[in-house]
Amino acid sequence: MENKFDVAIVGSGPAGIFAAYELMLKKPSLKVVMIEAGKDIYKRKCPIAEKKVEHCINCKPCSIMRGFGGAGAFSDGKYNFTAKFGGWLNEYLSDEQVLAFIDYVDQINMQFGAPTEVFSTMNSSLGKKAIACGLHLLDAKVRHLGTENNLKMLQGIYEALKIKITMLFKTTVKNIINQTNGFSLELESGDQIEADYLIAAPGRAGSEWFAEQCRALGLELLNNQVDVGVRVELPAIVFEHITDEVYEAKLVYRTKQYGNLVRTFCMNPKGYVVAENTDGIVTVNGHSFRDEKLHSKNTNFALLVSNKFTEPFNEPHQYGKRIASFSNMLGGGVLVQRFGDLIKGRRTNEHRLEQSFTKPTLKATPGDLSLVLPKRHLDNIIEMIYKLDEIAPGTANDDTLLYGVEVKFYSSRLRLSKQLETPIANFFAIGDGAGVTRGLSQAGASGVYVARTILERLIK
């Protein structure tokens, strides 16, 4: 195996993919290697998604979380056009620059089959209704790729990349070694990869690994947030007046009891609740298809409470994993509870779930989320559900289903330059797993931005 490259990219999620694509596009002669712990896009298969099993069986690596396309490969592919949320890229670039990179990545997606339709919350009637209820609607445009389209697009980009760059799958980097001239990546197999430039794009599943590598290299880490909450599932008709107009509404609310922010996230009209496995910890997520024949009768979305920690605590990732592990301990994976049962202080059992008018789209264990989530989180979520009921009557129905736990992991952030470069020269960090972004659009934008920085240096 050839082991000397101009650029090495660790991770093949959106950030790594678009970094590689930009390098390939602008300088095809570059020798680029992409190293990924998961499988290629064609070999990523989830037994639950294929309806071979009902519960997570701990496949290693988990094809939902790892592999070409990253954790977003099996998502419903919401591509947001905004610098206001979806990451912190506007701490390094102006909002105008962030939007320009987002538009650039979108044009590439369009070349590979992204749908033309775009939804927008700007100037919608929903914003006025929301603020009257004490909710705040975040303005943005969104292109709903759809789970099936998302996979086809990734397959097209994969085919374009594999001709020009080296891609190593089911390959784990054990150590990053900083050398006098460039970097050496020690693989679990014992092989080594040498590169002049290094781009770390570890994705959410690799964020903990990346934090460990940074500590070993003596790089200072800053505490980042972790978002913990539940996924709500209810009849699609409850949110139909919202999703028909804007597709996804990102609503933020500051609770009266604690003054904490709770937000809706990843809204999936007529979608499905799904399980994810991150290093043995099973959490919950959601997706939806564009094809109407694949629609369900339910809509699902996350309700997340953000936690940003101060010293001396410096392991937000572990905090989220420990909470999720309680759900796994009690239910063997994801727990589900009727909202009415939660309010009455009783666990949901099989009988109560069978009687529910809202039929779950994920086979989960009926249980009691009050034994899993901290009281403060649960109080915030309950208050938010009652508030949403004002703008979407029916949200607080007894049969609304709550799945737990949903956790969005973000790596402890590095001190990065404006070029997203670490204190080690020519070592860059991008995407969700590096704590720079938290979504498809800004992740892809960060990859293009760093690729252009490297190309400028190569020219000089």
Image: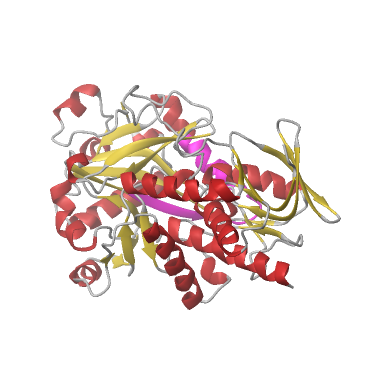
Q: Is residue 172 above or below residue 313?
A: above
- The spot of residue 378 in percent (x, y) is 36, 45
Image position of 245 (left or right of 98): left
Quadrant of the frame with the N terminus: top right
In the picture as drawn, the residue positioned furthest to the right comes out as: 180
Foreground residue among 46 and 243: 46
- The spot of residue 107 in percent (x, y) is 41, 65
Q: Is residue 302 above or below residue 25?
A: above
Q: Is residue 336 visible?
A: yes
Q: Is residue 6 above or below residue 134?
A: above
- The spot of residue 109 in percent (x, y) is 40, 58
Foreground residue among 317 and 372: 317
Boundaries of the magenta span? 302-324
- The spot of residue 325 in percent (x, y) is 48, 32
Foreground residue among 22 and 103: 22
Task: Tell me what residue is drawn at x 32 percent, y 60 percent.
Answer: 143
Q: Is residue 251 visible?
A: no
Residue 115: quarter of image: bottom left
Task: Tell me what residue is drawn at x 50 percent, y 63 percent.
Answer: 445
Q: Is residue 92 magenta?
A: no
Residue 116: quarter of image: bottom left
Quadrant of the frame with the C terminus: bottom right
Image position of 162 (left or right of 127): right
Task: Tell me what residue is drawn at x 54 percent, y 33 percent.
Answer: 279
Task: Tell me what residue is drawn at x 66 percent, y 66 percent.
Answer: 455
According to the image, what is the colour scheme of the structure? secondary structure
> How many numbered dots are placed on residues in this image?
0
